[in-house]
Image (cartoon, rainbow, N blue to C red):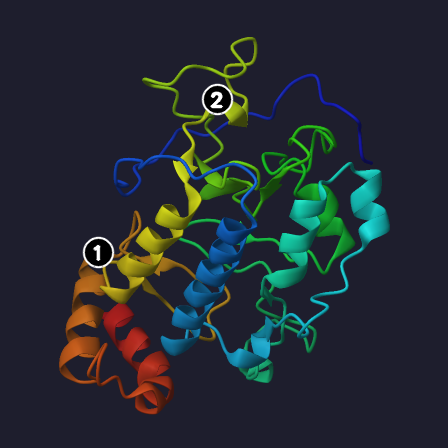
Amino acid sequence: MLQQSAHEPPPRPPRSPSPSLPSSPPLSPRGSLYNDEIIVSLINEFYSLLVSLDYLRPSQIIYPPPGTGHNINKKLCNSLNIDVAVIELMKRTRYVDGPYEDVQKLEGFNEEASAYGCHLFPGPRGYSFLRGDDIVESRDPENDGVEGVRLNYLLSHDVALSHCLRGGMILVLDTKANTVRVLENNSGPDTEGTVLERPEEPSHYRNCHPQDAPSYFRYLIEKVRSLELIPSGPSRWHKGFYGYNMGHEDRDQMKKILIEEYGWPDNFRQEAWARDAKEIWERIASI
């Protein structure tokens, strides 16, 4: 049952190490539609990289209809006091909510199984705002499903792009400042050297240091493009990024194969990789 507030936050597991991020550049101007468009474009570019590496299939991505964008539940958004800029962003981004093409080969999964909820960023699971439940739950991305959703937790102009449940990280985008806050492993914000916006609530997400959002997503794109992070897939239910807190040796082996045998990135033989990827991942995992 949904709750307007929760008196006690859920228990937080110990923080695990995470890859270092570049120092934060100056923040973008407030309220810039131009920057909002850049952010949507960068998120979509990141999705395209995941398709190129056969982490996702095109059939698993729901693209926004040209012109109008997705049919987002505006009535629900308005009832949750979600800002218009957030709704517009929801309408224009891509979502992973499509079926596995080889679902019949996945033992224990039915015909309804899909890539929905897979790790879209290094660590966290992405929301699909085509689903009303995700719109509601995204207003409290730290919720573990036990205490109830704090419907007024996020500011109206903030939107959580992902949630981590008991692992990974949370990405919260501020559409006014064009910044992103990254909370690791539900362990509360890293407030070192930061003036607390909510000193009375040390664990509040707004106390987390804001980073320039376009720079952050460009950083993620470059990490994948350089194969410092390699998404595994395509048909694994538990998808993940090798090189992020796990699988560094496997990442290095796969990086060598992708460059030397498949021509990544400039002469990438994408069709050949899509044909061979599953077998290669299984071989490396068995070593």
The crowd level at tag 2 (other Cα within 10 Å; few <14, some 14-19, many 20+) is: many
Which residue: 72% across, 22% down? 6
Residue 287: x %, y % from top left? 20, 69
- Residue 75 in view (yes/no): yes
The crowd level at tag 1 (other Cα within 10 Å; few <14, some 14-19, many 20+) is: some
Q: Which amino acid does label 1 sit on?
A: His
Is the N terminus in the top left, top right, bottom left or bottom right quadrant?
A: top right
Name above or below for residue 5 compared with residue 178.
above
User: What residue did someone put label 1 on?
Assistant: 248
Which residue: 28% across, 59% down? 222
Q: From the viewer's side, name the closer residue of 286 and 35.
A: 35
Residue 126: x %, y % from top left? 55, 54
Q: Which of marks 2 and 1 is in front?
A: 2
Which residue: 31% across, 74% down? 281
Image quadrant in which you'd find residue 260 = bottom left
User: What residue did someone put label 2 on?
Assistant: 207
Tell me if 69 is positioned left or right of 270 in this view.
right
Residue 59: x %, y % from top left? 58, 80
Q: From the viewer's side, name the closer residue of 178 and 77.
A: 178
Image quadrant in which you'd find residue 156 = top right
Residue at the far top in the pictured view: 200
- Residue 229 in view (yes/no): no
Q: Which amino acid does label 2 sit on?
A: Asn
Tell me if 89 is positioned left or right of 257 in this view.
right
2 or 1: tag closer to the N-terminus: 2
Local SS, label 2: helix
Tell whether label 1 touches label 2 (CB within 8 Å): no
Residue 266: x %, y % from top left? 22, 80
Name above or below for residue 169 compared with residue 270.
above
Local SS, label 1: helix
Tell me if 21 is positioned left or right of 168 in this view.
left
Q: From the viewer's side, name the closer residue of 82 and 25.
A: 25
